[in-house]
Image (cartoon, grey):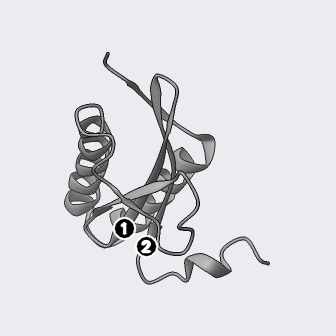
């Protein structure tokens, strides 16, 4: 059964923010990144378990794959794959949301 890809509100915002940031330096690279991110998400339909378990949260059902210098985090939810976030690899994931 084919799973559908669902982007969470947070992940859509992450993708949009990354695109806007990259576009300032290179509109072409920003567009390529956007395409890569969408293709990576779609590829999870065929291989949903290919991503690794997030090391910071080994007990979590959330997995991640890498797109250039970014981590795309997702989880399997019934018949869908939910993209839950995108963050740059240089960010300290454990400190996110602790403001």
Q: Earlier in the sequence, mark 2 or mark 1?
A: 1
* As drawn, 49 above or below 56: above
Q: Quadrant of residue 49?
A: top left
Residue 32: horizontal and vertical position, in percent? 20, 53
- Judge from the rendering whether residue 28 lies leftward or rightward of residue 79; answer left or right: left
Provide residue 33's location: percent of width, then percent of height. Answer: 26, 56
Of the 4 image quadrants, the one containing the N terminus is top left
Please give the name of the residue rendered at 56% of the width and 76% of the height, measured from the top-left corner: 93
Q: Residue at x 51, y 81 (%)?
A: 91
Q: Residues within 10 Å of mark 1 (few under 14, many from 20)?
A: some
Q: What residue does disc 1 label?
A: 70
Label 2 environment density (alpha carbons within 10 Å; few <14, some 14–19, many ≥20)? some
84 horizontally vs 64: left or right = right
In this view, 52 is above or below 15? below
Residue sitting farthest toward the front: 59
Q: Which residue is mark 2?
A: 88
Q: CA distance from mark 2 to mark 1?
A: 4 Å
Q: Is residue 43 left or right of residue 90?
A: left
| Residue nearest the viewer, comparing 92 with 29 | 92
Seen from the viewer's position, the closer of residues 89 and 2 is 2
């Amino acid at each position: 059964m084919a799973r559908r890809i669902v982007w969470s509100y947070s992940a859509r915002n992450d993708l949009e923010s990354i695109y806007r940031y990259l576009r300032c330096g290179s509109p072409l690279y920003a567009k390529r990144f956007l395409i890569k991110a969408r293709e990576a998400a779609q590829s999870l339909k065929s291989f949903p378990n290919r991503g690794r378990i997030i090391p910071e949260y080994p007990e979590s059902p959330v997995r991640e794959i890498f797109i250039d210098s970014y981590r795309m985090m997702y989880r399997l939810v019934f018949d869908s794959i939910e993209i839950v976030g995108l963050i740059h690899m240089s960010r300290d994931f454990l400190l996110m949301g602790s403001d």
